[in-house]
Image (cartoon, rainbow, N blue to C red):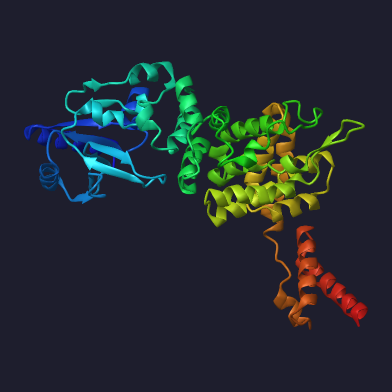
Amino acid sequence: MEYNQNIEMARRIAQCVAGAGGTVYYVGGMVRDRLMGVGQKAPDVDIEVHGIVPEKLEAILDTLGERQMFGASFGIYNLRHYNIDIAMPRKEKRTGEKHTDFRCEIDPFCGTYQAAIRRDFTVNALMQNVLTGEMVDHFGGVKDLRDGIIRHVSSGTFAEDALRVLRAAQFSARFDFTIAPETISLCSGMNLNALAGERVLAEMRKALMKADHPSVFFSQLRQMNQLSTWFPEIEALQDVPQSPVYHPEGDAWRHTMLTLDSAAALRNTAMEPWPFMLSALLHDCGKAVSTIVNEETGKISSIGHENSGVPLALALMHRLKTDKKTEQYVVSMIRQHMKPNLLPVQHSRPKAYMHMFDEALVPEDLILLSKADRIGQKISPAAFAETETLLRDMLSRYRNVIQKQPKVSGDDLMKAGFKPGKELGQLLAYAHKLWLAGIPYENALDQTIHYGKKLHRSSG
């Protein structure tokens, strides 16, 4: 459904409601985004209906289309085939620690002030009359929007939903806004333990996928002292030293944040943008447990951090309830993230590149991660150009030469007299190495059979 069609339906609803004595307002992020000039990038339209009872609103909607309702206590409707959230003003009161622990009461006559005070930030508490265009701004949201400030509406209502701590950081990252000091202070004292992992993941994902500088999300949480509950593996990178020879940018936290922002500039070219960004965040988390400083020489090393980081990354992803496919992608990227930059330095033969790309789940994204990683070491993209050209040439060879040649199979070997079992598995592994080396099928089959006979003689 096109944005303009949704707007037109909103106007029709507003005209009908006005005829019944009520008023309809655009509300929330939609008003904010329109004022920022990004309102038509998303098709959704959010409106709030004041001054008529639910039964009257339902009767109006039934004349305009197929009405749908989402929770009677929340008073939220839409019309089938339209992306319009149609809400009635409501009062909310927290009854417990979980995000679902709220008691809601619909009150269509509470007025715009009471309706807006339950919202999180002043820039999200703006309302605009659908028919007249008049702006309703009870809490200075227009000025905060102009000044680039994220400021909570009410200390009393804000603290009832701990997710707003993450939303503050997410909005700060997405819009490059500053969080007001009083909001930072309020967020610092809020308990995030009762939040659901899925909701935390949703806010982090918005920052990673929509912000030009997603590092701001984590930097703001760090300023609020709110990393430890959900992101202890990232928090642990603070003050972890790195070799100044290879990492002039500073500690592992600083490097991770720079890599994350570099990845954001590349994510639209990634094959799998979301897990790519998550990989950039977690690629070096193993340094928190593997970094050693030699007391005599002062040499800093993080040997094996690409492996020690895997259980840490999995712990964070399990906590946030990521899906298995994403976890597999991220683990693959963490384990391999150093190789694309090491192989050129080591003047490795093509066979090593073929092995690397064969082990990678998404080789194209592994190259992108290696680029973000190097830029995160404060080198320019131009300085990575030669390495990138080499990597892409090698990937082209893997895709267009290696992958297109036939491979010795288990059936081939069983026809040659080998039986299923451990020995056959060894032979298939051997044949796979020959395949990666570019050995033609017939030669590879002969060599594998010869190797198998040799194994058989030695075991006999």
The residue closer to the viewer here, 75 or 440, is 75
User: Quick check: 382 above or below 192?
Assistant: above
Q: Is 164 situated left or right of 353 in this image?
A: left
**Quadrant of the rendering where the N terminus is positioned:** top left
- Return the residue nearer the eye: 63 or 77: 77
* Point 8% across, 32% down: residue: 21
Camera sees residue 396: no
Q: How many marks?
A: 0
- Image point (17%, 23%), residue name: 132
Left or right, 46 with respect to 212, comes to left
Quadrant where the C terminus sits is: bottom right
Q: Position of residue 394 (x, y in %)?
A: 73, 47
Q: Quadrant of residue 406?
A: bottom right
Residue 232 rendering spot, x and y as whole percentages: 62, 41
Question: Which residue occupies the extreme front position in the image?
Answer: 95
Residue 227 in sight: yes
Q: Nearer the viewer, residue 37 or 50?
A: 50
Q: Nearer the viewer, residue 319 or 457?
A: 319
Counting from the top left corner in percent of width and height, residue 430 is at 80, 67
Q: Position of residue 48 (x, y in %)?
A: 22, 35
